[in-house]
Image: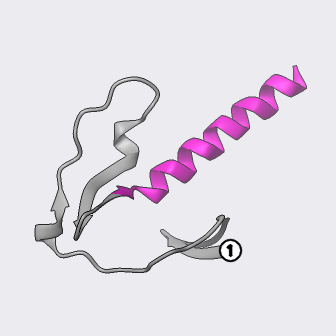
Amino acid sequence: MVIVLNIGSKVVGMVVDAVSDVITLTPEQMRPTPEFTGAIDSGSVLALGTVNDRMLILLNIERVIDRTDTEAQVDDADQQN
């Protein structure tokens, strides 16, 4: 399955396993991002959302894609050397 994202002035397709819901959260349903330690880049997480008894992680997709692109460029450079 491919989801289509508008990121800045670009339209990007992202392959995903599944999409279960598309929802709109109110400000009351969002909580600030806690401090993460370890391998999680806390800058990639916008907030935590709550819907009934579910907790949702809201991602900064621009940052996630930018980080993925940067890592791919480093991998390409390593392979060329």
**Image: magenta residue range:** 57-81
User: Which secondary structure, mark 1?
Assistant: strand
Q: Quadrant of the rendered structure where residue 35 is?
A: top left
Could you say where residue 8 lies in the image, as x and y percent from the top left? 48, 68
Q: Classify 9 as above or below 59.
A: below
Q: Residue at x 17, y 68 (%)?
A: 29
Q: Quadrant of the C terminus?
A: top right
Q: Residue at x 61, y 44 (%)?
A: 68
Instruction: Determine which residue is flagged by label 1.
Output: 2
Q: Residue at x 80, y 23 (%)?
A: 78
Q: Classify 36 as above or below 58.
A: above
At label 1, counting other C-alpha atoms closer than 10 Å, the crowd grade (few under 14, some 14-19, many 20 or more) is few
7 or 33: nearer the eye? 33
Q: Classify 5 as above or below 48.
A: below
Q: Residue 80 magenta-drawn?
A: yes
Q: Quadrant of the N terminus?
A: bottom right
User: Is 42 left, or right, of 74 in this rendering?
Assistant: left
Q: Quadrant of the rendered structure where residue 15 is?
A: bottom right
Q: Report the residue that reaches farthest toward the front.
A: 53
Q: Taking the image as drawn, is residue 9 in sight?
A: no
Q: Main secondary structure of the magenta part?
A: helix
Q: Report the residue that reaches farthest toward the right.
A: 80
Q: Residue at x 72, y 37 (%)?
A: 73
